[in-house]
Image (cartoon, helix red, strand yellow):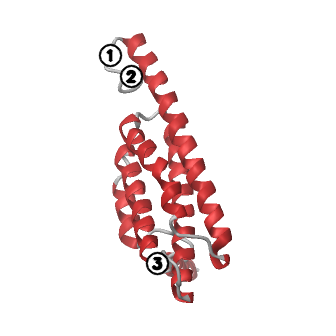
């Protein structure tokens, strides 16, 4: 009986190990981040300002990559590349906004990175428009423009709210205004 229980637990541990190995090996094909970028995001988990700056960097890299394929007379492969970068841009904007929502709920002081984000998001729509129009990626293009506008609006609104919130807490506590004590 004891042997059966031991075999059962060994089988259970083996199955759990196989499942976790398979999960680790198979990256979500819809994930816009590379393994290196995922690692950088993980390493910045305790520093919200750094994490936001990483998302800005990754989004800017997608926009720069898209510029390489811009212009008239694109091949089918280049059009597919533009579509892929537009979709990555949109997913990265969504992830960035999810992080902003989390930091907002926690009242994390991200004013420093929000200033950079507000400035950066203001130029994203123009960078996206530089890709030009094409029926093969029209939907992705429109979605990316909507994501850019949404990110711009959220960054601007959150920046204003953070200034008010931390100024109020600075006055209440007579401190530096870097966050609630």
Residue 34 horizontal side relative to residue 82, left or right: left
Q: Which mark is residue 35?
A: none
Instruction: Classify residue 2 by image quadrant.
Output: bottom right
Q: For the residue labelled by badge 2, is the local secondary structure a helix, a strand or a loop?
A: loop
**Disc 3 vs disc 1: which is toward the camera?**
3
Q: Are marks 3 and 2 in contact (CB under 8 Å)?
A: no
10 Å crowding of disc 3: few (<14), some (14-19), many (20+): some
Question: Gap in Å between the C-alphas at discs 2 and 1?
Answer: 9 Å
Viewer-proximal residue among 140 and 167: 140
Q: Position of residue 119 (x, y in %)?
A: 42, 44
Query: Can you identify the residue that label 2 sits on?
Result: 181
Vertical side of 39 occupied by 122: above or below: above
- According to the picture, the residue beneath numbered tag 3 turns out to be 69
Q: Quadrant of the N terminus?
A: bottom right
Q: Earlier in the sequence, mark 3 or mark 2?
A: 3
Tell me the residue at 68%/77% (across/down): 135
- The x, y position of residue 123, in whole percent, is 46, 52
Whether residue 134 is situated above or below residue 159 in the rendered picture: below
Question: Where 59 sits versus 173, above or below?
Answer: below
The furthest residue to the left: 176
Q: Which residue of the protein is positioned furthest toward the bottom in this rendering? A: 76
Q: Residue at 37% of width from left, 58% of height from top?
A: 57
Is disc 2 in contact with disc 1, using a CB cutoff of under 8 Å? yes
Residue 175: mark: 1
* Residue 99 seen by the camera: yes
Q: Residues within 10 Å of mark 1 (few under 14, many from 20)?
A: few
Q: Residue at x 43, y 45 (%)?
A: 117
Mark 3–mark 1 distance (CA, rounded to whole Å): 51 Å
Q: Earlier in the sequence, mark 3 or mark 1?
A: 3
Q: Nearer the viewer, residue 143 or 166?
A: 143
Q: Quadrant of residue 54?
A: bottom left
- The answer to whether residue 44 is left or right of residue 4 is left
């Amino acid at each position: 009986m004891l042997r059966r229980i031991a075999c059962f637990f060994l089988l259970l541990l083996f199955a759990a190990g196989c499942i976790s190995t398979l999960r680790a090996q198979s990256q979500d094909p819809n994930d816009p981040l590379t393994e290196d970028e995922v690692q950088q995001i993980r390493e910045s988990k305790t520093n919200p300002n750094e994490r936001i700056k990483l998302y800005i960097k990754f989004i800017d890299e997608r926009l720069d990559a898209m510029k390489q394929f811009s212009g008239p007379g694109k091949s089918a492969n280049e059009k597919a590349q533009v579509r892929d970068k537009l979709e990555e841009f949109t997913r990265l904007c969504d992830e960035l906004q999810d992080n902003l929502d989390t930091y907002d709920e926690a009242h994390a002081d991200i004013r420093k990175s929000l200033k950079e984000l507000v400035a950066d998001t203001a130029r994203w729509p123009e960078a996206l428009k530089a890709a030009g129009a094409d029926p093969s990626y029209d939907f992705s293009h429109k979605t990316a423009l909507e994501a850019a506008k949404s990110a711009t609006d959220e960054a601007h609104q959150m920046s204003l709210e953070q200034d008010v919130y931390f100024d109020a807490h600075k006055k209440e506590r007579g401190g530096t205004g870097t966050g609630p004590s």
